[in-house]
Amino acid sequence: MRCIAVLTASLLMALPAFAQNPKIDTRHLDRISKQAGESVEVTLEGAMLRLALRAVRNDPGMYEAVKNIRGIYVRAFSFKEQSADRAGIESSIWSQITTPPWERIVRVKGKDGEDVGIFALIDPNKGVFQGLVILVTGGDELVLVNIVGEIDLDKLGKLSGNFGIPEINLK
């Protein structure tokens, strides 16, 4: 009986990890937007996302790639100089995605201080991505792309260059 209680408690403690929100908290980015020379903010969710989906219904491949997405969030900033506040905010974003249940797909650290990562939040029951984050920090820019919802990786390339997502050529 005691073994069952311990097992049940362990499972309940693990549930919040599986239920983690795939949407990254970006509220603190407003503080550094004032320091940026240029900034871009794209938010597609709810009615606006449904409207965007209507625009791609004639492209079956594109529609299949996006039909289960609940939100696309892009934040991009270019800076003239580094600041302690910016470094702290970048660190906060990295800490959200470098801990379980997020899983690293790719991380590249450049000699110039640029740090690029692609991380996924996987639903262990369905075996599909529930969230994807592409993060670029260091140097003179900060770019965050956060896609929330079921994502089919085979079809994800169709999003490149659309919905405010930067075009990615993987050749």
Image (spheres, rainbow, N blue to C red):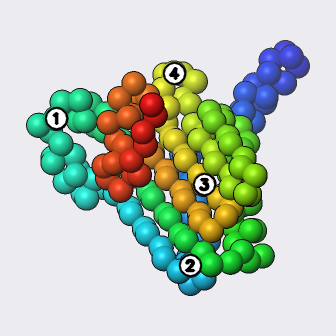
Q: CA distance from mark 1 to mark 2?
A: 37 Å
Q: CA distance from mark 2 to mark 3?
A: 15 Å
Front residue of 57 and 81:
81
The mark that comes first in sequence, 4 or 3, is: 4
Report the disc number at residue 88: none
Q: Position of residue 86 (x, y in %)?
A: 69, 72
| Closer to viewer: mark 4 or mark 3 | 3
Q: CA distance from mark 1 to mark 3?
A: 30 Å
Amino acid type indicated by mark 4: Gly
Residue ID at (60%, 40%): 119
Left or right position of 68 against 169: left
* Residue positioned most to the left: 58
Residue indicated by mark 2: 36
Q: Position of residue 166 (x, y in %)?
A: 41, 52
Does the residue at mark 1 contact the one at mark 4 (Cβ under 8 Å)? no
Does the residue at mark 1 contact the one at mark 3 (Cβ under 8 Å)? no
Does the residue at mark 4 contact the one at mark 3 (Cβ under 8 Å)? no
Badge 4, how many Cα within 10 Å: few under 14, some, many 20+?
few
Q: Secondary structure at mark 2?
A: loop
Front residue of 105 and 78:
78
Q: Is residue 18 visible?
A: no
Residue indicated by mark 3: 136
Residue indicated by mark 4: 127
Hey, which quadrant is residue 156 in on the image? top left
Q: Position of residue 63 (x, y in %)?
A: 23, 35
Report the disc number at residue 59: 1
The mark that comes first in sequence, 2 or 4, is: 2
Q: In this picture, is 11 found above or below 76?
A: above
The mark that comes first in sequence, 1 or 2, is: 2
Badge 1, how many Cα within 10 Å: few under 14, some, many 20+?
few
Q: Is residue 165 visible?
A: yes
| Closer to viewer: mark 1 or mark 3 | 3
